[in-house]
Image (cartoon, rainbow, N blue to C red):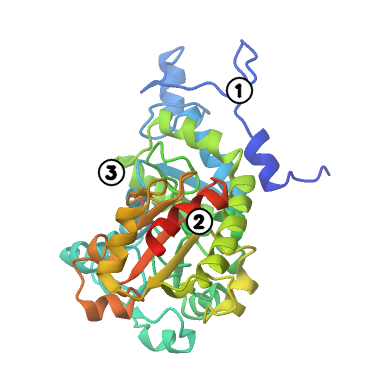
Amino acid sequence: MEKPLQPQTHAIRGQMDRTQYREHATPLFLTSSFTFDSAEAMAETFAGERAGIIYSRYNNPSVDELVAKACALEGTEAGFATASGMAAVFASLAALVKQGDHIVATRALFGSTHQLLTNILPKWGVTFTYVEPEQPETWAAAVQENTVLFVTETPSNPGLKLVDLAAAGKLCKAHGLLFVVDNCFATPVLQRPADYGADLITHSATKWMDGQGRVLGGLLLGTQEVMDKVIAFCRHTGPAMSPFNAWVISKSLETLHVRMAAHCQSALAMAHWLGEQVAVTQVHYPFLESHPQHDLARRQMTAGGGIVTFELAGGIAAAQRLLNAVQLCTLSSNLGDTRTILTHPATTTHSKLTPEERASVGISDGLIRMSVGLEALVDIQGDLLRGLG
Ligand SMILES: *Cc1c(COP(=O)(O)O)cnc(C)c1O
């Protein structure tokens, strides 16, 4: 039997079939629907008896190519692409719960995921309990008779807390829970939750997968059994990704492995360099030995990722001074870009939380989140020195 291709080879060579023009790069199928040769062919395609594409809310060749590549990267059986990461996260929950169900989730979740759990799903009678990401021994106590999902994200945004995926996989198996992981920060290059038994993996493809800040996108990747439910939900609720965005992201996946290697190498060097700066009181990065879960990071990730966070002694004033001083780094809420981006979570993404709530997810007033880009490191460091001096 022929050996299956390595994931990074599939990301480059796993393209759709060529058209009659024998193009080398992948064509873009900007079409909302597809045609049929006969009434019978149409009927058989609708009945699922004949292969064929019907409508781009369900399938589109450009989107299917992206999904197949993402499945190869994550090691999953099936997938669906959505218009944004949040559409994927919402579908991952809404497709799998019903009134009266309960979710156990690790506390350090993306802000909008927290909103889904606290403000949206409760309207439909779905409840949740938060557990501490770093304390797997306490998770089982939160499982109730009506618990159906364990929802997690690792490393977390922006606290960079890690969740032990092996421990989570064991818990889900023991209690018959579906295991759902937001793998946006790590990407499948650094960790593959399916290897730990994850049933469903979500991505904001807007971030590292596109990697160049061009388009929004989300991915749902999982076992065939779970994806059958998720795909049915998505077909009828309509969060489908545009073929154009899929074409852009599919192209970006060709360079995901080399980009992530470069982002991670720069981020680790940046983390060490930041640690030497007098104005910086603390640096957080999973592959720094000072990270409280450093051993776990080395065990479950192949590199530390492209996000570094650091704390300035001067609190909000010092953080804002740095953001106002830089000329190369950009101030933006996005991350996972070729361009280095700085954000100040306490006054932006997490300003609605109380200082105590922020502290519980590891966000101090002087914390800066840095998405390390692909510029020359010396240029980013020189830029930061404008505001760190
Ligand atoms: C950005 C992000 C999302 C949401 O993705 P969008 O594409 O912005 O909708 C979800 N989870 C994590 C961890 C993210 O960083």
Q: Position of residue 56 (x, y in %)?
A: 38, 29
Report the Cα–Cα distance between label 3 and label 2.
Answer: 46 Å
Q: Residue at x 50, y 56 (%)?
A: 381
* Residue 52 as seen in the image, left or right of residue 213: right
Q: Residues within 10 Å of mark 3 (few under 14, many from 20)?
A: few
**Nearer to me, 138 or 291:** 291
| Residue type, label 3 | Thr
Q: Quadrant of residue 16?
A: top right
Q: Residue at x 16, y 64 (%)?
A: 123
Q: Which residue is mark 1?
A: 25
**Nearer to me, 165 or 311:** 311
Q: Which residue is mark 2?
A: 381
Which is in the foreground here, disc 3 or disc 2?
Answer: 2
| Residue type, label 2 | Gln
Q: Which residue is mark 3?
A: 237
Q: Residue furthest left?
A: 123
| Residue type, label 1 | Ala
Q: Earlier in the sequence, mark 3 or mark 2?
A: 3
* Residue 304 as seen in the image, left or right of residue 208: right
Q: Position of residue 330 (x, y in %)?
A: 37, 47
Give the quarter of the figure containing the N terminus.
top right
Q: Visible in this render: residue 152?
A: no
**Nearer to me, 187 or 308:** 308
Q: Visible in this render: residue 282?
A: yes
Q: Residue at x 46, y 80 (%)?
A: 175
Whether residues under marks 1 and 2 lie with C-beta atoms below 8 angstroms apart, the answer is no
